[in-house]
Image: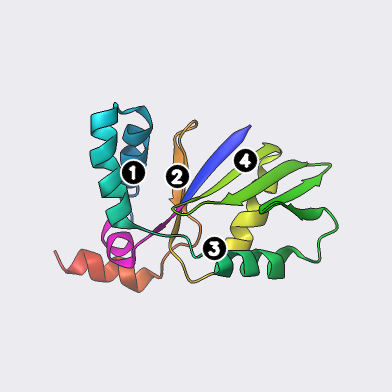
Amino acid sequence: MRKYDMYIIKELFANFYYGREYFFYHLFKEYETANIKTKKILSKQIDYISSSIPAIQIYKQLIEQLQGRKDFIMNNGMFLVENSRGSVNFKIYPKKCVMQSTGTMDIDMIFMEALRKTEFNFLVVDLDNGRFGWIKPMKDHHYLETLSSR
């Protein structure tokens, strides 16, 4: 099973750290393994760089994008796609979205493609496998502005 945590990173931090996403990954990884005292500090840092999840907007986007699929169901606030390639479920929490999947890797893309159409800077973190990245890469001009301001 693969598990992905998805955070909306505030634009200021997304622009500044574009290309250096491993800093975010290390912050989330350290939070997962930290003791209680350190977890409090790291939690404040995570709250500072990330936005709350606009659940209604995300629900609407997912329903709009996925309602035509025969393998899509929604149950108790959880979205689920299950077919011969595997299964993937998606749940929205106040500060992050969590997606869990089994089967082929292309099944993971179903929800990521739907979220790519939003205006938000979603960073996906797979702590178990050391993978991370943006759902929707930023425009090149944002990255160039950050580099040129050094």
Find residue 132 and name its label. 2
Which amino acid type corresponds to the residue marked 3 in the rendered image?
Answer: Ala
Q: Is residue 40 left or right of residue 54?
A: left
Which amino acid type corresponds to the residue marked 1 in the rendered image?
Answer: Tyr
Q: Which residues are magenta?
A: 7-17
C-alpha gap between disc 4 and disc 3 = 18 Å
Identify the element where label 4 is drawn.
Answer: strand
Q: Quadrant of the C terminus?
A: bottom left
The residue positioned farthest toward the front in the image shown:
76
Position of residue 134 measured from the top left corner of the image (x, y, whole percent) = 45, 55
The residue carrying mark 4 is 100
Residue at position x 45%, y 62% from top? 137
The residue carrying mark 3 is 55
For the stretch drawn in magenta, what is the main secondary structure? helix
Q: Earlier in the sequence, mark 4 or mark 3?
A: 3
Q: Nearer the viewer, mark 4 or mark 2?
A: 4
Badge 4 vs badge 2, beta-carbon distance below 8 Å:
no
Find residue 22 and name its label. 1
Residue at position x 30%, y 64% from top? 15
Q: Earlier in the sequence, mark 3 or mark 2?
A: 3
